[in-house]
């Protein structure tokens, strides 16, 4: 397996849509799929949504590949209305790796590249929002030097979901 990380391209949007849906369902829909989940996924992770992300100057989408196979992706956002300025100017808005490819360094390579891009853009720190019950993701970010700086509540269907906000300085060496 030869893993590379590159910027996503327009022809990747369908694959990214499927990959994001798969990982999201694995993470949040453990008891089944609600209509609200389907509505959320078909809006936020559609191929058209990924095309918009690729066209947005405030967003970088990175993919991790093994030849033609996409195994994961990261979305870095900065300076846009989607970034919550109280936590910082740059966010790793999404970092998803297929569960079949977990623990192979794919997430680390994507995060490393996202942090490099944030540093090049002049950002002093990067934050991420992680579902409090996603213990594997929390441990991953903490191993990279991220520290909890706050929490926020997100609405998911008819329930509230607590998110941990973690941040790391881009000028420190992580790992």
Image (cartoon, grey):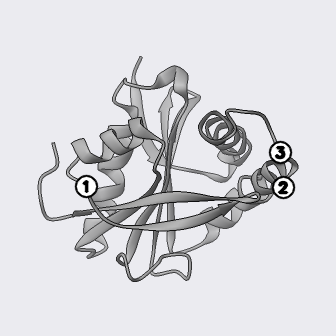
Q: How many marks?
A: 3
Residue 18 % position (x, y): 72, 38
Q: CA distance from mark 2 to mark 1?
A: 32 Å
Query: Mark 2: which secondary structure?
Result: helix
Residue located at (60% from left, 51% from top): 9
Query: Mark 3: which secondary structure?
Result: loop
Residue located at (53% from left, 20% from top): 100
Q: Which mark is residue 146?
A: 1
Residue 93 % position (x, y): 49, 60
Q: Report the residue marked by disc 2.
A: 39
Q: Report the residue marked by disc 3.
A: 34
Mark 3 vs mark 1: give the one in front: 3
Residue lying at the far right of the rendered structure: 35
Crowd tier of the residue under label 1, counting other residues whose Cα lies within 10 Å: few below 14, some 14–19, many 20 or above: many
Residue located at (40% from left, 38% from top): 135
For the residue pair 61 and 154, the one nearer the viewer reads as: 154
For the residue pair 131 and 58, the one nearer the viewer reads as: 131
Location of the N terminus (image quadrant): top left
Location of the C terminus (image quadrant): top left
Q: CA distance from mark 2 to mark 3?
A: 9 Å
For the residue pair 14 and 144, the one nearer the viewer reads as: 144
Residue 26 % position (x, y): 63, 33
Query: Mark 1: which secondary structure?
Result: loop
Residue 122 % position (x, y): 26, 76
Q: Are marks 2 and 3 in contact (CB under 8 Å)?
A: no
Q: CA distance from mark 3 to mark 1?
A: 32 Å
Q: Which mark is residue 88?
A: none
Establish if 1 lies above or below 93.
above
Crowd tier of the residue under label 2, counting other residues whose Cα lies within 10 Å: few below 14, some 14–19, many 20 or above: few
Crowd tier of the residue under label 3, counting other residues whose Cα lies within 10 Å: few below 14, some 14–19, many 20 or above: few
For the residue pair 152 and 174, the one nearer the viewer reads as: 152
């Amino acid at each position: 397996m030869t893993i590379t990380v590159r910027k996503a391209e327009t022809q990747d949007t369908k694959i990214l849509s499927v990959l994001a849906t798969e990982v999201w369902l694995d993470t949040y829909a453990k008891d089944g799929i609600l209509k609200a989940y389907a509505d959320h996924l078909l809006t936020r992770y559609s191929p058209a949504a990924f095309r918009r992300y690729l066209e947005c100057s405030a967003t970088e989408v990175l993919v991790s590949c093994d030849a033609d196979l996409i195994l994961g992706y990261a979305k870095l956002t900065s300076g846009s209305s989607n970034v919550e300025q109280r936590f910082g100017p740059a966010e790793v808005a999404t970092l998803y790796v297929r569960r079949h490819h977990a623990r192979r360094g794919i997430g680390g390579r994507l995060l490393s590249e996202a942090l490099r891009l944030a540093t090049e853009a002049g950002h002093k720190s990067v934050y991420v929002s992680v579902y409090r019950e996603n213990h594997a993701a929390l441990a991953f970010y903490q191993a990279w030097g991220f520290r909890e700086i706050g929490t926020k509540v997100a609405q998911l269907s008819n329930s509230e979901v607590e998110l941990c906000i973690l941040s790391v300085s881009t000028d420190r060496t992580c790992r």
